[in-house]
Structure formats: C-alpha cells, structure tokens
Amino acid sequence: MKMLTSTTANWSSVTSDDPHNCYPENIPEKKPIAILYMIIVILGIPSNCFSLFVSCQHIRQNKELGIYLFNLALADLCFIMTLPIWVDYTLKDQWQHGGTACTACVFLLFTHFYTSAALLCCISVDRYVAVVHPLNFLSMRRTTTAIAISVLMWVISITFSAVTVSLQHNYEDSVCLDVLPMSSAQPKVNIARCVIGFLIPAILVGFCSRGIYVQMKTNQAIKAEERKKVSRLLLVILLTLWLCFGPIHIILVLRALLEDCGQPTWLYVSYKVSVAISSLNCLADPLLYCFITRSGRASVTQVFFTIRRKLGT
C-alpha cells in the first residue's frame, strides 16, 4: 500500500507544462523487470538454440512444421540479443545508445511480436489442415510451401513494423520507446497494432483450435495419445498469444484512448510491465517442439544422454 501511495504521489505531480514531468519517478518495478530480462537471456539463448537443432531434425525429415519452428526460434534469438540493452535502459532510466540504436531496438521489438504471432498462426493452420482436412490441401503441407509462407510472414511483419515504427516518436532526450506526450499519430498506430498484430492472429488461432477440438472429439479414429499431443500444442499456442501478447496490446489501446500527459500517467507502469511480460514468449516458444511433440521429447532425451555420456568419459 505504501508503494502504491508513493507511486501515485509521483504521478499526481505530473503536469503538461514540461514534457519531462510526464514520466513517473522512482518506479519500484524497474529492478524486477530488469531481472526478468536477464533470466530470459540466460534461459532463452540455450533453449532457442536447442530449438533450432530440434527443428532442423524436423526439416531433414521433410516435415513442414520444422520450417515454422525454425523461424520462430530464429525470431526469438534475434530479439533476445537486444535484451541486454533494454536491461541497461531499465536500470538507468536513460537511453545512452543514441537515437539510431533506439529505433533499431524498437523495430526489432515489434518485429519479434508480429513475426512470432504470424508463425504461431502458421503452426495452428498447419495442424488444422492436418487434422480436419487430412486428404485436402496437401500442397500446403509441403516444405517448399512452408518456406515460401515463412518468408512471406517475415516480409509482412518487417514491413508492418517498419511502417508503424516510422510513424511514432521513438527517441527524445535519453528516452526510448516511452516518449511522452504521445505524438498525434501514436493512438492510431497503437490501435492498428492491436487489430492487425494481435486480434486477427488470435481469432485465426481460436478458429483453428475450435475446428481441431471438434474434429478430435467426433473422430474416433484419432488415437488418445495423438489427441493429447495436439491438445497440448494448441494450449501452448493459445496461452502464448493471449498471456504474452495480450496484455501489451490491451495496454496500447488503453494508452491510445486514455493517456494524457496532463493527467496522472497511471498506465505508464502497466505499459512497462506488459512489455516485459511479452518477452516471456521467448521462453514459451521452445515448449512447442522440445516438450510437446514426440520427436521433440525424443531429441531432448537424446541430447541429455549424449551430454551425460561425454561428461562420464
């Protein structure tokens, strides 16, 4: 309660006369956020590197799912490499790397959001076609098609991120991403990000998940083990989308509708926390292939046995 009162007191002093007064001071959440980023770096690099290895095994077996998983791990690793800079910024409350580096990091942040969401959609659609229409749309399940779709998802995500990032004010006076007051275009950018980058993928994944659930419930030919495997896969995808990317996009819309530098910036800390939560996607994605699919678990076991044998010798 004392912490909340203190933070609220800082917010209540905000005035619109000086842009620098838009920012709350002494945010108590900055250390936990920095610690979370460091944990993601420590765990995310090896787990996603291992995921690249596992997905390569899928690709060698001509499984189109491996293409999507490989690109998902690649997107996670590209973003994780920027996290040490965000740790430095979070702890010091000052961006010391210049405007160009700020814009690049913001671009990579949002590119990671939308590339991951797009690839999760691809995995959901791939499983939907495999379960609901196993004899149709066979061309969609070829590795060449998966490569073309993955490249297209990267192009769309990069283009969308480049356009939206160019429309917002990313850097000002040692402040990166969190520039206040927001530019006139920022509310429209936030709403576009929510609709195109989150709601559409979430609806598509929900549609595929429902179709797969109905098919597995009515089709008795699907084995119980296969039902559990697909159910776990879909659960992780849904939780990743809603729990990792949901909060940040909800806050973006609330900021577009409610935030005003002349009023207490009560959404500011929620925004910072939601950005940190979105980074957990880098730890959730490896679960898709390393601990849910049968070949993924087999690869995990094989690597552990190999490491143990080498350590024993």
Image (spheres, rainbow, N blue to C red):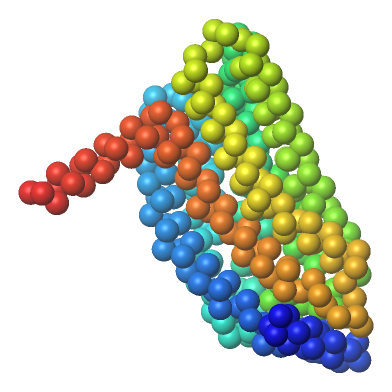
The quarter holding residue 27 reads bottom right
Q: Residue at image x 41%, y 51%?
A: 47
Q: Is residue 41 above or below residue 296?
A: below
Q: Is residue 195 above or below residue 253?
A: above
In front of the other: 85 or 162? 85
Q: Residue at image x 61%, y 46%?
A: 240
Q: Residue at image x 76%, y 84%?
A: 5
Q: Residue furthest left?
A: 313
Q: Residue furthest front?
A: 1
Q: Residue at image x 73%, y 69%?
A: 270
Q: Residue 95: where, in percent of width, then height?
A: 62, 82
In which quadrant will I find the N terminus? bottom right
Residue 76 visible to the viewer: no
Q: Residue 290: where, in percent of width, then height?
A: 42, 39
Residue 11 visible to the viewer: yes
Q: Residue 143: where, in percent of width, then height?
A: 51, 26
Residue 309 horizontal side relative to residue 181, left or right? left
The quarter holding residue 191 reads bottom right
The quarter holding residue 11 reads bottom right
Q: Residue 219: where, in percent of width, then height?
A: 61, 10
Q: How many marks?
A: 0
Residue 176 horizontal side relative to residue 37, left or right? right
Residue 219 horizontal side relative to residue 210, left or right? left
